[in-house]
Amino acid sequence: QVQLQESGPGLVKPSGTLSLTCAVSGGSISSSNWWSWVRQPPGKGLEWIGEIYHSGSTNYNPSLKSRVTISVDKSKNQFSLKLSSVTAADTAVYYCARETAAGTVLAFDIWGQGTMVTVSS
Amino acid sequence: QSVLTQPPSVSGAPGQRVTISCTGSSSNIGAGYDVHWYQQLPGTAPKLLIYGNSNRPSGVPDRFSGSKSGTSASLAITGLQAEDEADYYCQSYDSSLVFGGGTKLTVL
């Protein structure tokens, strides 16, 4: 059973870079799946950040594209998120998730437990 | 402001049937893109509830059903139970993956 676990600093200073890693266990990151980051500000809804395939191909949310970098490390079976120039608006629970084929749109079938990141000085 | 519009809240008494709508447009649902639904219990990660408009993953009770028509989709929950109290999100595609704003279901 594939499991995902997010890790990284829980506090980031304004204008800094948020860095998180998602470790994949129970399966290979080189499977035929895309891997995503999704965030949820306190009391608000879900926002897709971006995705990566094991080949290194990426797609990003247009609203965040200029600040987001997602990378994959196949040797460690993990993928990572970097979000630059953060502000208080980036304070959120960050989830990593696996996407699976589900018709014409990929669905998120496995989620990590989420990690809270606060942007504050 | 999401391109997929959901009602902020719905409610129902135990045993009743409730529906949650997800209204899109010709650039997303109306363009033929499928809709998925997620259930998020308080303090937990979202869980895939319905995929491909109307399919249930293994383990999801048949009290949950989904449908899609035109530029909208709906999630129906029958035989409402207290444990169904949660936030529900629709998800589709509109130049990128998108979620609806979410609907809070209250079981009265």
Image (cartoon, coloured by chain):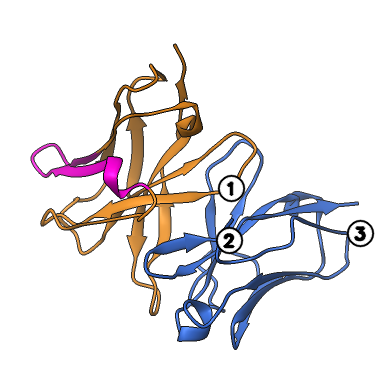
Chain colours: A orange, B blue
Q: Tell whether position A70 is magenta.
A: yes
Q: Tell whether position B76 is magenta.
A: no
Residue A41 position in % (x across, y down): 55, 37
Q: Chain of mark 2?
A: B
Q: CA distance from mark 3 to mark 1?
A: 25 Å
Q: Chain of mark 3?
A: B
The residue range painted magenta reads: A64-80
Label of residue B13 in the image: 3
- Type of residue at label 3? Ala
- Type of residue at label 1? Gly
User: Outermost residue toward the bottom?
Assistant: B70
- Can the viewer see residue A25? no
Quarter location, residue A16: top left
- Type of residue at label 2? Gly
Q: Are marks 3 and 2 in contact (CB under 8 Å)?
A: no
State the residue in front, A92 or B79. Answer: A92
Label of residue B100 in the image: 2
